[in-house]
Image (cartoon, rainbow, N blue to C red):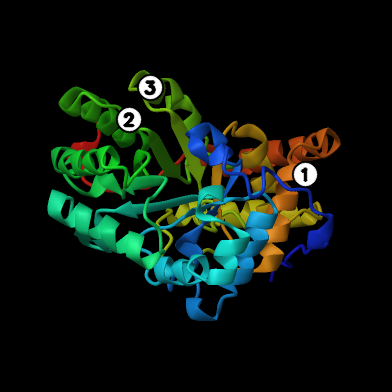
Amino acid sequence: MMNFVQLPTPPAETIRPVGPIKSNIHTLSLDGLPPLVLGGAQFNHQYNDDPFRLPVKDIIKSCFECGVCAIDTSSYYGPSEILIGEVLGDAEFKEQFPRDTYFLITKAGRIAEQEFNYSPEWIRKSVNRSLERMHTSYLDIVYAHDVEFVPLEEAVCGIAELFRMKDEGIIRNVGISGYPVAVLVRLAELVKNRLNKSVDVVLSYSNFTLQNTLLKNYLDDFYTAGVKKVLNGSPLSMALLRSQLPHAFHPASTELKAKVHEAAKYSASQNVELADLAMRFALRNWHGTTVIGWSSLFEVNRGVQAYWDSQNKELALEDEEIIENIRDILGSSVNETWPSGLIENYP
């Protein structure tokens, strides 16, 4: 059995904030997005057996106090929006952190694992339900969620409704999210051609990690399509890049999982936890915002510390040789992806 390398994490009071705190200036545009965003997928049964037992209020409060003043969730993430809303709707919390001091982000269009609905009626209903759940009158970003699973023309119809809600002031920015980067580029171009409008934000997950850096190759394509911001989600590739075994639902190939397990053993032999190394790699090399899920205060503190560690030049030099050897271990699995969505959506 492989030992988990547990390194000490500084107490919260010693951690430097990563961005402004309680500022209603930085939230006026996407340029004010903090470098880290709290991912709400962790507040779901998929990642935690009982999300209702998670210290959600403490996690959000700690994030905001650390300058991680943004939350990303989805109506698809089980009770996530409800749990977040219970915190944001609390009178004491609202007094401490007014609504205009943080970004609130959600997604619409995906209902269940195999159920999607991008009709204008459903998109509007889903967004209105999210507003109610999270006790807010507006949302900073709403993504069309996992767009690769429906015909792209169908996704465009739902995105058009999001733009209508943007015109009404309910949504500040319209986004698209999903896994296959080439499909996201194709959809961003299609939206521009069909609607004569540009998607504001793109979120792709597991595509800028220690194992896979494909997202960076497509940035120019997104910007040509008029996209303002591209966010990197899940820098640990949905908990694949760690010493523990991945979750049963993880879609990576058996070969990739085996190589990551070998890489984790090598990393542990160097007294470095693979998850810490992978997090530093992603934060060091991705020049933009990263969405990360945390289930405890320990994970919040550790994640924020990883952000500062990623900027430590001496540590970067120490990491360099280990990273090079790990990528050698991964071999042909570097930049390997897994199938996601409809084949006809791929260029």
Q: Residues within 10 Å of mark 1 (few under 14, many from 20)?
A: many
**Circles 1 and 3 in contact, beta carbons < 8 Å:** no
Task: Give above or below for 167 relative to 193.
Answer: below
Residue at x 43% of width, y 74% of height: 45
Amino acid type, mark 3: Asp
Closer to the N terminus: mark 2 or mark 3?
2
Rate crowding at label 2 as few (under 14), some (14 to 19) or many (20 or more) other CA atoms within 10 Å: many
Viewer-closest of 190 and 346: 190
Q: Residue 221 carries which label?
A: 3
| Residue occupying image coordinates x 52% and y 35% | 213
Q: Of the two numbered discs 1 and 3 on the same chain, state the one appearing first in sequence.
A: 3
Instruction: Give the SS element for disc 3.
Output: helix
Can you identify the residue that label 2 sits on? 185
- Residue 325 in the image, given as x and y percentages of width and height: 70, 40
**Left/right of residue 52 with respect to residue 165 in the rendered view:** right
- Where residue 18 sits in the image (x, y, percent)? 70, 44
Give residue 158's position: percent from left, percent from top.
19, 45
Query: Residue 177 occupies which quadrant of the picture?
Result: top left
Q: Distance between the residues labelled 2 and 3?
A: 7 Å
SS at mark 1 in the image: helix
Q: Mark 1 points at which residue?
A: 309
Q: In the rendered structure, which amino acid carries the disc numbered 2?
A: Val
Image quadrant where one finds the C terminus: top left
Tell whether label 3 touches label 2 (CB within 8 Å): yes
